[in-house]
């Protein structure tokens, strides 16, 4: 149906989809932690732009994008805002951030190394917060 079918679109498509999915997952976690302000969203966009280049060099890494973008944003936030995302599991003691595992692999999760637990999949931090209603 599309007379303007561009073969390049077909090549780029899956990578763009993976980038789009990674962006959506990380933004969902930022929203869950109420730090999705405009300048934070731009940090995500910066990461996406860098990872776009990266994944074009290594298309097999498309499945790792969500974990990588999450870590990029985590690092960027550490400079500007402090630790993110704070561990929702450990109620006491020093506030600490969750880590992404695997650092470079598919199906990334936020984990608390202190408690030794998987907290949530990247993109599902909001669900891990308990869902008892936020107000
Ligand atoms: Zn913890």
Image (cartoon, helix red, strand yellow):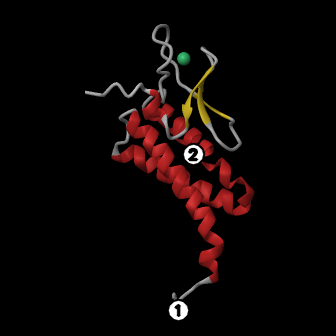
Dot 1 falls on a residue whose secondary structure is loop
Q: Is residue 133 above or below residue 61?
A: above
Q: Residue furthest bottom?
A: 3
Q: Residue furthest top?
A: 93
Residue 120, x across and y down, in percent: 54, 31
Task: Identify the residue under disc 1.
Answer: 3
Specify few, some or many for label 1: CA neighbours under 10 Å numbering under 14, 14-19, or 20 or more. few
Residue 72, x across and y down, in percent: 57, 42
Single out the mark in the foreground, 1 or 2. Answer: 1
Q: How many marks?
A: 2
* Residue at 43 percent of width and 39 percent of height: 30
Residue 119 picture quarter: top right
Q: Which mark is residue 60?
A: none
Q: Is residue 112 above or below residue 14?
A: above
Task: Identify the residue under disc 2.
Answer: 69
Mark 1–mark 2 Cα distance, whole angstroms, equals 35 Å
Residue 133 picture quarter: top left
Q: Is residue 3 above or below residue 64?
A: below
Q: Quadrant of the C terminus?
A: top left
* Residue at 50 percent of width and 17 percent of height: 89
* Residue at 51 percent of width and 88 percent of height: 1
Label 1 vs 2, first from the N-terminus: 1
* Residue at 45 percent of width and 11 percent of height: 91
Contact check, label 1 and label 2, Cβ < 8 Å: no
Dot 2 falls on a residue whose secondary structure is helix
Q: Is the CB of the residue bearing disc 2 within 8 angstroms of ligand 1?
A: no
Residue 56, x across and y down, in percent: 68, 63
Looking at the rendering, the quadrant in which ligand 1 lies is top right
Q: Nearer the viewer, residue 26 or 40?
A: 26
Would residue 106 appear left or right of 22 to someone viewing this image?
Answer: right
């Amino acid at each position: 149906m599309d007379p303007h079918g561009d073969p390049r679109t077909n090549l780029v498509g899956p990578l763009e989809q993976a980038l789009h999915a990674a962006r959506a997952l990380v933004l969902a976690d930022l929203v869950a932690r109420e730090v999705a302000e405009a300048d934070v969203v731009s940090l995500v966009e910066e990461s996406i732009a860098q990872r776009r280049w990266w994944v074009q060099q290594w298309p097999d890494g498309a499945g790792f994008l969500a974990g990588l973008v999450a870590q990029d944003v985590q690092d960027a936030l550490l400079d500007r805002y402090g630790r993110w995302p704070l561990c929702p599991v450990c109620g006491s003691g020093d506030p600490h951030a969750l880590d992404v595992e695997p650092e470079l692999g598919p199906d990334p999760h936020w984990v608390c190394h202190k408690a030794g637990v998987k907290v949530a999949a990247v993109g599902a931090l909001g669900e891990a917060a308990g869902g008892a209603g936020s107000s």
